[in-house]
Amino acid sequence: MSNGQGNIPRTEIEAFGEFGLIDLLTKNIKLKNKSTITGVGDDTAVLEKDKEKYQLITTDLLVEGVHFDMSYTPLKHLGYKAVVVNFSDIYAMNGTPRQVVIGMSVSNRFSVEAIEEIYSGIYLACEMYGVDVVGGDTTASPGSLFLSITAIGEVKKEDITYRKGAAEGDLVCVSGDLGAAYMGLLILEREKKAYEANPNVQPDLSGHDYILERQLKPEARKDIVELLKKENIRPTSMIDISDGLASDMLHICEHTGLGVHLYEEKLPIDLATVNVADEFEILPSVAALNGGEDYELLFTVKLDDHEKIKNQKNIRIIGHMTDISNGRYLVSNDGNLVALKAQGWDALKKDKGGSPGNSQKS
Amino acid sequence: MSNGQGNIPRTEIEAFGEFGLIDLLTKNIKLKNKSTITGVGDDTAVLEKDKEKYQLITTDLLVEGVHFDMSYTPLKHLGYKAVVVNFSDIYAMNGTPRQVVIGMSVSNRFSVEAIEEIYSGIYLACEMYGVDVVGGDTTASPGSLFLSITAIGEVKKEDITYRKGAAEGDLVCVSGDLGAAYMGLLILEREKKAYEANPNVQPDLSGHDYILERQLKPEARKDIVELLKKENIRPTSMIDISDGLASDMLHICEHTGLGVHLYEEKLPIDLATVNVADEFEILPSVAALNGGEDYELLFTVKLDDHEKIKNQKNIRIIGHMTDISNGRYLVSNDGNLVALKAQGWDALKKDKGGSPGNSQKS
């Protein structure tokens, strides 16, 4: 039997990584419909809705053994996280999520009750964020659990925020704190290994509530989008931090052709993150730069908005956009310029050199 | 480590099947957003778009080893089929597909060239049907190839066709012919077994072009939706035949609370389908009723439209809607009433009793 794979030359996926592969697969797209405003390349696609609004569409896959590990992921949290990470993409366009469709592929390892538990997390998140579950597909899987979520949102045309909107001199801001979700993952992986080595040892997760919640049940920053609106601060560009601050900052740089200086001393890092990073002998700033899965909003504002933004307690100004000739750097506490590198989570790259920031989620 | 599955009672998924599980998971949904017109329960969800139009959203998963077998599925055809079956759902609402987002989870068994081949089929279908690829997610898989497609379409409010619109006395119509895709599958499975038993035997697929194409590279009935519009025929209800005529006819019955009489002698079955059915000792009408994956449109029209519809060469009138007291039957060629049963493709049921119509895809 021939399936058409016979004589095709073979390039390994790992050679490309996720972003390289997406570029390769989407570089020749020519949009045909006038209702398509923008396609691939931002946090969401943008469609014409009506005179006043755009519609936003985003999709994410969560695959067992790639994005999550059933041995320590509570099913309800899994469902919650699966939809929230999609809402985060909608907020990153300065929009509001409205609907979601759920694809789920389950093997018979899972009981009906287990699937209900996943769905209870999905519904809880939808309740919290005011989103309707409007459709889905449920099917068998020969092995891993697959979750495929597509979220639909909307945004007033005048409010939409693309990655490309930043200008030289704009302030770079980030919500919340960074690196905690990755530290949560390291704790879970460590305790899993200890349990596998000796099932009589109870996992020690005590005192790690914050970082574990950041990993297992993250929230999307609805509050920040609402705050910016209330304070009449219009972000010039925005992205959510899923792959790590460095990787996502570079996306804004690439979309604008600009450089950036971020300041290590300004990075918002929770004390719980610092403590666990110390334990694992990782620099906290490396966890913040490369950990990923923070689902915080990274955005730029005009210098004029400095006064409005500087005292917001959930927002930190961490740097500023520069001309490309100034490069894309983190200015370290000792004054060195460290080039930003996209070392964060990349679900398609097998080996990225063993940097402590690699969130290789087995 | 505890993942929350510990003390939950266990009901097997097979006990529910796909539709039972969907009912269970979605029965308590309360819609919150005014832009959500209808959610789960038809071929697509329906959202408010603007004053004149609704937007339609549908999602489908295709999983290796469940929905397709890589040993005989050409990659380009796989990509083509994956999106076309979603377009079919949009046409079944009397709408037009406009955008699609693609989720793909691939293991490193697949080369970059293989993924490009799948995408070339996706793009070909989008070109043929005038649809834009606007987004997606590409990620690793620990095993099976997993495709998740979400299609977005639109329809004028006055044209939207739900399953629930049929009335007593309406004519039941179907486009094209039925049962061929299932016969194609049986041929492919037979030749696969022969090849596995003796790899020196070349698979014999000759003379089966039509049924193989129906299985491997189906089309959605854009032409029928356009024809109905041109002829000013407004379907009162519509569904696409993915699970088999019997199963999908019963969906219309359930949504309307009506009965139906279909006539065996009226079922459109291609000669190629009849020949292979004979070879496999299956009644051609059983293949038509239960085979599934036809992606033809099953719809009802008012009796007044009889004159307009009766001479359309790609449409066959196969029965009529009745009061529920008349039951839901196929009237066989010898005049017997055979109750319609949903024996078609159900990706979550393990064993459905061995009826020849069970498209249990390995």
Image (cartoon, coloured by chain):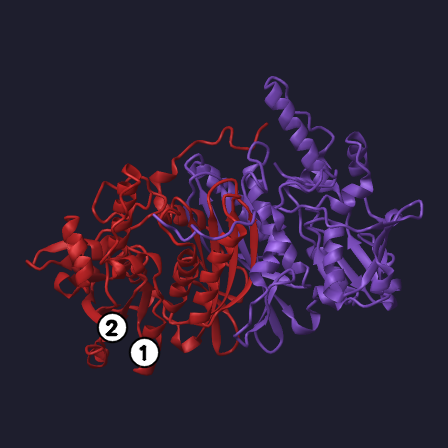
Chain colours: A red, B purple
- Callout 1 environment at 10 Å: few (<14), some (14 to 19), or many (20+)? some
Q: CA distance from mark 1 to mark 2?
A: 10 Å
Q: Chain of mark 1?
A: A
Q: How many marks?
A: 2
Seen from the viewer's position, the closer of residues A289 and B251 is B251
Residue corresponding to mark 1: A227
Q: Which amino acid type is shown beneath numbered disc 2? A: Asn
Res. A343 in view:
no
Res. B103 in view:
yes
Q: Chain of mark 2?
A: A
Answer above or below: position of A22 versus A42: above
Q: Is residue B229 found left or right of A292 in the rendered image?
A: right
Residue at figure coordinates x 58%, y 52% from the top left = B127
Answer above or below: position of B176 versus B257: above
Displayed quadrant of residue A320: bottom left
User: Where does the C terminus of chain B fall, quadrant-wise?
Assistant: top right
Displayed quadrant of residue B142: top left
Badges 1 and 2: C-beta atoms under 8 Å apart? Answer: yes
Where does residue B184 sit, x and y in percent of width and height?
A: 70, 36
Task: Give me the disc on residue A314.
Answer: 2
> Disc 2 on helix, strand or loop?
loop
Where does residue A53 sit, x and y in percent of width and height?
A: 48, 75
Where does residue A241 sit, x and y in percent of width and height?
A: 30, 60
Answer above or below: position of B220 versus B95: above
Task: Give me the disc on residue B25.
Answer: none
> Disc 1 on helix, strand or loop?
helix
In the displayed image of the protein, which residue is found farthest to the left? A334
Where does residue A142 sit, x and y in percent of width and height?
A: 52, 40
